[in-house]
Amino acid sequence: MKILCLHAGNLPMVGLQDVVAVLLSGNRYFGKFSRNDPWLIASFVDVCRERGLPEVCGCSTELGSFSGLRADAVLFTGSDKTVPAVMDELFRLKAVNTKPKTRYLIRTAQLSVAIVRKKQSAWELLEAVTRYDGRGCRSVGVVVSPYSLDKYAGALRMAEACRKEKVSVPEPGAESDGNDHVPESVAGRSADTNNGPKKYLHAYAVAAGLPSLQLFDGRWMFIESDDTGLIREGVVLWIKGGEEELGKVQNRLSGRIQSVFTDGTEMEGVEGKAGEAEIAEGTELADLAGDAESADESVEAALAGDDDFESLNKAQRPEFDWSPDGLDTLQWLAGFTKPFFLPGSREAGCRKSHPGKSQS
């Protein structure tokens, strides 16, 4: 069967999983790469071709290359706002079928939530917020904490300084050295909150008396409020509270939340205990980063057997078998496709070529 994968540039792990799932299920892979990130998945596909896998049938950065494909299934990851336009274009190009009807696996979760009660977690929190420019579905857009934002601001500023010290930030226009700890938006261009949408949000926060914090030259803004309508690119909602507040957020953002991360502490009765995790006076920047990294094993142990939360240190480094939107792609494909054949077998091979060829 022909499986068309529409890959999102800000979700490389999801795209890689989709390719592997299609190949393991014995189907024929057609991939539309994102122009924003045509490297990771394209490189993997090139390796598959070099190894002689005939199931890799067509790849392109242009959706028009798949005109007339009539795919049996489509794997798509994006926002719910883009789904109608993508579907219309697929039908216009006759890249999908109406009879028999093409099957669709669409993942539309937009953001994730972090439960944070330790100030030593500030380093990992910024990682979870800023990596992939904050546009991935595992990027943290809401924080629930027993701390107020004012009480946690010092830890965030220290983590920001630590990240800036650890990473050499290039001058605007300079070539990247391949280090992705600080997003391109932070390293390569100004993001002054005196301009653009954040100008008005900052003014609103001041007028409403809402605590707010700007980091990385205004590229990121934390604002303490339970108003989920304030969520947007570059803005992190900070909610002071515990389990009750987490439940309210999950209800309000139903269908939009990908994952809930924690720094390894239980939510029940969490309020009032924040003081147990203060950062000691005189802590060096390097010590803060080291504390975050050395805490990984203890966090993993605390989460053992808990299917509801994931470790904050894994927010942007998920396990390979992680399931986007809770849907196992391989299991979904196996539910209606032919049995698996060994790669390279006559049954699994592509029987004819298609215009969607690699443009690399």
Image: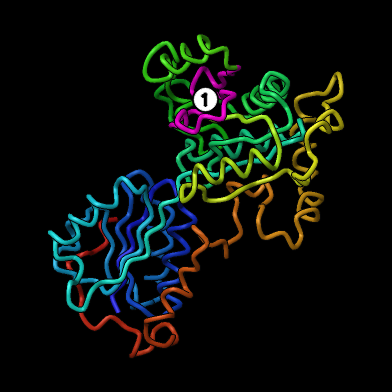
Quadrant position of residue 75: bottom left
The vertical placement of 53 against 157, above or below, is below
The vertical placement of 84 against 334, above or below, is above
Q: Residue 143: image x %, image y %?
A: 62, 35
Quadrant position of residue 3: bottom left
Q: Can you see residue 179?
A: no
Q: Quadrant of the N terminus?
A: bottom left
Q: Residue 161: image x %, image y %?
A: 66, 22
Name the element at disc 1: strand
Q: Residue at x 60, y 50 (%)?
A: 317
Which residue reaches farthest bottom? 346
Q: Residue 285: image x %, image y %?
A: 75, 25
In this picture, which residue range is highlighted in magenta?
Answer: 211-235
Looking at the image, residue 297 sits to the left or right of residue 215; the answer is: right
Q: Quadrant of the C terminus?
A: bottom left
Task: Answer whether residue 229 is magenta in the image.
Answer: yes
Q: Residue at x 86, y 19 (%)?
A: 281
Q: Can you see residue 12?
A: yes
Residue 221 vs residue 294, the one in the foreground: 221
Q: Residue at x 75, y 38 (%)?
A: 292
To which residue does mark 1 refer?
Answer: 220
Task: Answer whether residue 49 is magenta in the image.
Answer: no
Q: Residue at x 75, y 35 (%)?
A: 117
Looking at the image, residue 314 sits to the left or right of residue 85; the answer is: right
The vertical placement of 226 against 15, above or below, is above
Q: Residue 89: image x %, image y %?
A: 18, 55
Looking at the image, residue 104 sits to the left or right of residue 252; the answer is: left
The coloring applied to the image is rainbow
Residue 87 vs residue 187, the one in the foreground: 87
Total marks shown come to: 1
Q: Amino acid at mark 1?
A: Trp
Residue 181 vs residue 237, the one in the foreground: 237
